Amino acid sequence: MGQWMDALLIVVPFFTVALLGKRVVAWCTSHGLVANHDDRRSHTTPTPHGGGVVLVVLGVPLGLWAVWAFQLPYGWFLTVLLLASVMVAVVGFLDDKHEISARWRLAVHLLAVAVGIGFLPPMFDFMPLWLDKLILLLAWGWFVNLFNFMDGADGLASSEAAFMTLAVALFVPVFKPLALPLAGLSLGFLTVNWQPAKVFLGDVGSTWLGYVLGGLLLVACADDTWTLAWPLFTCTLVFTADATYTLLIQRLAQGHKPWIPHREFWFHRVLRLGYSHAQLAWRVAALNLLLLVIAIIGWAADAGIFTLLAGMLAVAVVAWRITSMEGVVYGKR
């Protein structure tokens, strides 16, 4: 693909979502999709949610067109991925509208993941096939839900989705025709999701992004798992490290149920220190840029797992900095 085509694949989806932004806000409001303040959200003003439906409505047909127009590898997996993502989105929309049981949501997520995994080749050839599939099921299912958990600040999940898809386009250029439009859609949503957010992704948008991005990251590693998995996983650390540490080390260890809403993620802690949602998003973008540099260097040097360890060290330093600031701020009270 030429540079002009690359640009079009981002710009057209971006402006399409941006132009539809006000209508999406109005549609969510008219359908009673309004998020009130609760233990998960960092907002006190009721705000429409479920706006991520626009990403689904545009992203699925656009993605299917890209898969077959550009004859992408693993075309059947990508086709199943996009079609099964509708199931995830529908459950997310119903949850936005009616708040359905976490058990049923998880069941549908795992079903959609299982369907997708059935079309993926084995990723770890040194282990039995059943174990390979089980690991992928748990990892991908967790990614869907952690992306949903981390959608709690203006512009955070949308900008993170754009970063991850651009990382896939960089490291595995053959998937650019699908990754770039997804980046464009996510960036376009920022026009109504940036502080002050006029609409939120909702579960329909965050779980859909988590499912599609999880599948895209996995298939991007399919042909060269041990070379590409480390840099690509490094580029997900802002979300994967925060959600995994907070839920497994803090919440579960203290006896809390992981699906109970809370505001204990690291990004919540930054907001409580007095930073605005925009300041948080820009700092996350800077951290993502650092992680990308680490991933590129590690990839070029064929550093393997040391790439991921370097990324984790960078995230740990940021976490230490946040903890130090909390000590100073709360210690004065």
Image (tube, rainbow, N blue to C red):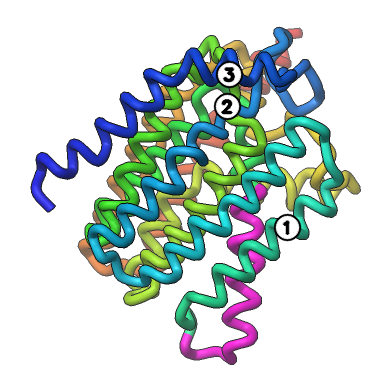
- Front-lying residue, 307 or 163: 163
Query: Do the residues bearing badges 1 and 3 touch, measured as CB atoms within 8 Å?
Result: no
- Name the element at disc 3: loop
**Which mark is first along the chain, 1 or 2?**
2
- The image quarter containing residue 309 is bottom left
Amino acid identity at mark 1: Val
The residue labelled by disc 1 is 108
SS class, disc 1: helix
Q: Please say if the residues under marks 2 and 3 sit with CB atoms less than 8 Å apart.
A: yes
Q: Is residue 144 magenta?
A: yes
Sequence-first tag of 2 and 3: 2
Q: Which residue has dot 2 on it?
A: 51
Q: Residues within 10 Å of mark 3 (few under 14, many from 20)?
A: many
The residue under label 3 is which amino acid type? Val
Residue at the disc numbered 3: 199
SS category of the residue bearing label 2: loop
Where on the picture, by quarter, is residue 53?
top right
Q: Residue at x 86, y 45 (%)?
A: 101
